[in-house]
Image (cartoon, rainbow, N blue to C red):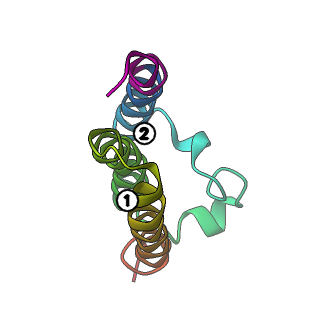
Amino acid sequence: MDTIEIIIFVPIALMLVALAIVILKGRGDVLIAGYNTASKEKQEKYNIKRLRIVVAAMILFVPALGLVAACLDDMTGITIDILPVLLIVVVAGIILANTWCKKK
């Protein structure tokens, strides 16, 4: 990992980790897209604790994936290997947010 990669990656990773902590502590519900603009009736259909976990896990996955990418040297390999994984995680997060996080 070069110095410029460290200068760029570390602050972004720290901000994402801080954002995930804020959401897990319950102070960042207004940052969850769609939930903050939903009516009170629609918000009550979701288990907010589970939704926080799913959103925070998706946010924390990005710096973890970035760390893996930074450890690899071949930039074309990073794009080919990591973007499909990121896509799968985003789709899985959306599915979890709409199934596991809904109240029954």
**Residue 74 horizontal/vertical position (percent):** 38, 49
Residue range of the region highlighted in magenta in the rendering: 1-10
Q: Position of residue 54 (x, y in %)?
A: 37, 59
- Numbered label attached to residue 54: 1
Gap between marks 1 and 2, in whole Å? 10 Å
User: What residue is rendered at 59% in x and 41% in y?
Assistant: 31
Q: Is residue 8 magenta?
A: yes
The residue at the point 49 percent across, 69 percent down is 87
Give the quadrant of residue 60: top left
The amino acid on which the numbered mark 1 sits, given as a three-letter code, is Val
> Vertically, is 55 above or below 8?
below
Residue closest to the eye, 87 or 99: 87
Foreground pick, 53 / 66:
66
Residue type marked 2: Ile
Q: Earlier in the sequence, mark 1 or mark 2?
A: 2
**Magenta segment includes 71:** no
Point out residue 91 in the picture as x, y percentages from the top left corner: 49, 75
User: Please, what secondary structure does the residue beneath circle 1 have?
Assistant: helix
Task: Give the residue displayed 38% in from the left and 48% down from the top.
Answer: 56
Q: Looking at the picture, does residue 84 appear above or below residue 62? A: below
Provide the residue designation for mark 2.
Answer: 23
Q: Quadrant of the C terminus?
A: bottom left
